[in-house]
Amino acid sequence: MFGNPSRPQPMPISIASIRLVYPITNPETGVTRDVVINQLKAVPPNMQSPNMSLDRWRYGKKWDRLVPGLNVVIPWPAVEVPEFETMEADTIREQVEDRTFYYGLLSPPMPEQVVDELRNKYSKFRTRHEAWYIEKKQAEEALKKGRLEALKAMQTPLDEFHEKNRAARAAAGEPELSEEMLAKIGEFMAKKKSVALENAGASEVSATSTPPQETTNAP
């Protein structure tokens, strides 16, 4: 293999031996020479970059490679635009851009079954209902009201009297105790308390305490 130089043979190369080489022009001397790039910095995509093209923006890498310290952008290789063939099963662009659906005010924008899937048809928070559902509920309310009126027609005089009393009590509200009634209740509670103390053989303790008396001894 080494004795015959006319027959080149592939040799394994370590990935650590691969270098990025790019020609850079010295701004002071104007000499261009190949330089080994040891570090690159990624620059965010910019459509206004001079190295950006529409083909690269659509099919290539959008971010730029910048050499730190030199502020030199290493451009990417030219992007090859892929060629697409239109098959029989493909939809051509004219058909895609052709408008085939129009919104109307007299019909929903989607089938009613899809509307029921998007919103809960049986939710208690639903406020808009169909006409047949509203008529059904109105009929149920009318039937319920008719039953109540039929029950009222079958009331006895005693039932009517009780109903009037309930209405009068509801209109009057909660009863209030007068000053005289409160005084009577206080007297009754005091009497019951004194009887209970006598039966227990105890006396009532006063809340006011008597001060201690000073005693003096005669000399």
Image (cartoon, rainbow, N blue to C red):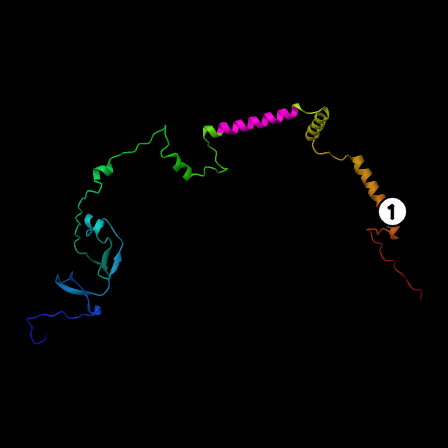
> In this view of the protein, can residue 33 be seen by the observer?
yes
In this picture, residue 189 sits left or right of residue 125: right
140 is within the stretch colored magenta: yes
- Numbered disc 1: secondary structure: helix
178 is within the stretch colored magenta: no
In this picture, residue 50 sits left or right of residue 200: left
> In this view of the protein, can residue 25 be seen by the observer?
no
Q: Residue furthest bottom?
A: 3
In this picture, residue 172 sits left or right of residue 84: right
User: Residue 129 at what x, y percent from top left?
Assistant: 46, 31
Give the residues in magenta: 134-152
111 lies above or below 56 = above
- Amino acid type, callout 1: Val
119 lies above or below 11 = above
At x 57% / y 26%, what residue is drawn?
143
Which residue, given by chain and number where applicable, does mark 1 sit on?
195
User: Residue 213 at what x, y percent from top left?
Assistant: 87, 58
At x 85% / y 43%, what residue is drawn?
191
Label count reads 1
Q: Which residue is nearer to you in this view: 81 or 62?
A: 81
- Mark 1, residues whose alpha carbon is within 10 Å: few (<14), some, or many (≥20)? few
Which image quarter holds the C terminus?
A: bottom right
Q: Could you tell me what secondary structure mostly forms the magenta stretch? A: helix
At x 88% / y 50%, what residue is drawn?
199
User: Residue 170 at what x, y percent from top left?
Assistant: 68, 30
In this picture, residue 130 sits left or right of residue 217: left
Quarter of the view holding residue 97: top left
User: Residue 10 at what x, y percent from top left?
Assistant: 13, 69
At x 53% / y 27%, what residue is drawn?
139
Which image quarter holds the N terminus?
A: bottom left
Quarter of the view holding residue 18: bottom left
